[in-house]
Image (cartoon, helix red, strand yellow):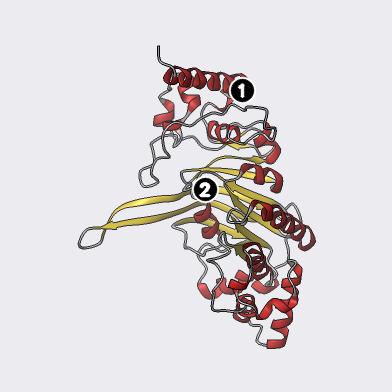
């Protein structure tokens, strides 16, 4: 099959399938620069992305979201695992075989200031990808660049300008235009609005939603902002220390979370009513190092549910696997059935009592 002629997968059908994906980075040290350890950035991840949907990856900084997104596109080479795109296994194909496929798999980077070469005009920033994919005719290339700019709400005459002449929001629109110029099927959006002013974020998000609808795009949306994810996404994968902790639709995860980490993240979402004081579950301690992840459940060192259940040994000795809770809702927790509104409320109240005791000792 000619990679340039891969037909679009029908809406709702699996476009991307990831199985057992790992990305480990060696730690080297000493005079001889030998490997002295390993960073398990992504450590055995499975998920599917359906055509036409937005699949979000959420979690704290350092959990492996960005590494996973770039590994899926093979911008960095995975250590192990299988990546299937539009029915084709692309895990181990050569760079020459992968090159024509890259037009179908694009990325929007987080930093609109650092992701654009300051020495290149917009015409070259967007046009170099077209040139690399074989569009040699300069006039045709310039026309495509102008059309791409217009698609993201920028004027066609901006092609001669340089990045320093634009605002942050405009630069991110140029980054979006660059990704769309090649006509991709799937776009990895790596924290696309986190570096922008709050007033601009909603404009860019609405633009991405409009483009998804108009161009039948599929997104992998990477973010740490759960409010944005709820507004923007269809399904969500919650990551912790290189693994998927919970998978499900937005409705499933936000209304019926089944992993204690997801519950804690959701409790941190601020309430829009300033008069309503929302109590939250505060996770104890820091995230363990991905170079030395805990045995058993990776979340057990900070888990409020384990503490509530009397610290069962199973959490330390046995690594939980994703279990199905129906309708595609999966979680990797041995005691997911114990999570309820009463359990969460009790844990929050216990934390409040302890905080009061520390603040006001007898």
Q: Position of residue 15 (x, y in %)?
A: 67, 57
Q: Nearer the viewer, residue 128 or 319?
A: 128
Q: Position of residue 214 (x, y in %)?
A: 79, 61
Q: Nearer the viewer, residue 24 or 208?
A: 208
Picture layout, residue 85 above or below residue 229 = below
Picture layout, residue 137 above or below residue 358 = below
> In this image, 103 relative to 32: left or right?
right
Q: Nearer the viewer, residue 82 or 305?
A: 305
Q: Mark 2 sits on what residue?
A: 45
Q: Residues within 10 Å of mark 2 (few under 14, many from 20)?
A: some
Q: Which mark is residue 340?
A: 1
For marks 1 and 2 on the same chain, the one whose residue lies earlier in the sequence: 2
Q: Going by the picture, which residue comes out furthest to the right?
A: 214
Picture layout, residue 274 above or below residue 62 = above
> In this image, 292 relative to 126: left or right?
left
Q: Residues within 10 Å of mark 1 (few under 14, many from 20)?
A: some
Q: Position of residue 81 (x, y in %)?
A: 49, 55
Secondary element under disc 1, as helix, strand or loop, is loop
Secondary element under disc 2, as helix, strand or loop, is strand
Q: Going by the picture, which residue comes out furthest to the top?
A: 362
Residue at coordinates 58% horizontally, 24% vertically from top-left? Answer: 339
Residue at coordinates 74% horizontally, 55% vertically from top-left? Answer: 206
Picture layout, residue 200 above or below residue 347 = below
């Amino acid at each position: 099959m000619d990679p340039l002629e891969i037909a679009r997968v029908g809406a709702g059908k699996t476009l991307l399938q990831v199985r057992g994906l790992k990305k480990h980075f060696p730690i080297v040290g000493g005079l001889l620069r030998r490997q002295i350890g390993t960073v398990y950035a992504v450590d055995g991840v499975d998920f599917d992305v359906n055509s036409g949907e937005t699949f979000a990856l959420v979690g704290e900084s350092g959990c492996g979201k960005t590494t996973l997104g770039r590994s899926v596109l093979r911008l960095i080479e995975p250590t192990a695992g299988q990546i299937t795109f539009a029915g084709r296994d692309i895990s181990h194909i050569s760079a020459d075989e992968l090159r024509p496929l890259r037009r179908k798999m694009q990325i929007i980077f987080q930093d609109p200031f650092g992701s654009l070469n300051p020495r290149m005009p917009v015409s070259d920033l967007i046009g170099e990808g077209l040139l690399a994919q074989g569009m040699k005719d300069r006039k045709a290339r310039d026309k495509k660049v102008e059309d791409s700019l217009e698609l993201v709400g920028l004027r066609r005459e901006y092609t001669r300008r340089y990045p320093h002449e634009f605002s942050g929001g405009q630069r991110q629109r140029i980054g979006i235009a660059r990704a769309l110029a090649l006509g991709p099927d799937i776009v990895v959006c790596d924290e696309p609005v986190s570096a922008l002013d709050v007033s601009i974020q909603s404009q860019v998000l609405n633009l991405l939603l409009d483009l998804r609808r108009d161009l039948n795009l599929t997104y992998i949306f990477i973010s740490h902002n759960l409010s944005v994810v709820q507004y923007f996404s269809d399904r969500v994968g919650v990551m912790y220390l290189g693994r998927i902790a919970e998978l499900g639709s937005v409705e499933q995860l936000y209304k019926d979370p089944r992993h204690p980490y997801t519950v804690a993240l959701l409790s941190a979402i601020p309430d829009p009513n300033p008069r309503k004081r929302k109590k939250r579950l505060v996770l104890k301690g820091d995230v363990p190092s991905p170079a030395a992840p805990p045995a058993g459940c990776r979340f057990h060192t900070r888990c409020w549910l384990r503490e509530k259940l009397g610290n069962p040994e199973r959490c330390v000795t046995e690594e939980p696997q994703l279990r199905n809770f129906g309708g595609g809702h999966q979680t990797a927790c041995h005691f997911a059935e114990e999570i309820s509104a009463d359990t969460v409320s009790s844990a929050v109240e216990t934390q409040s009592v302890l905080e009061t005791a520390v603040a006001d000792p007898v």
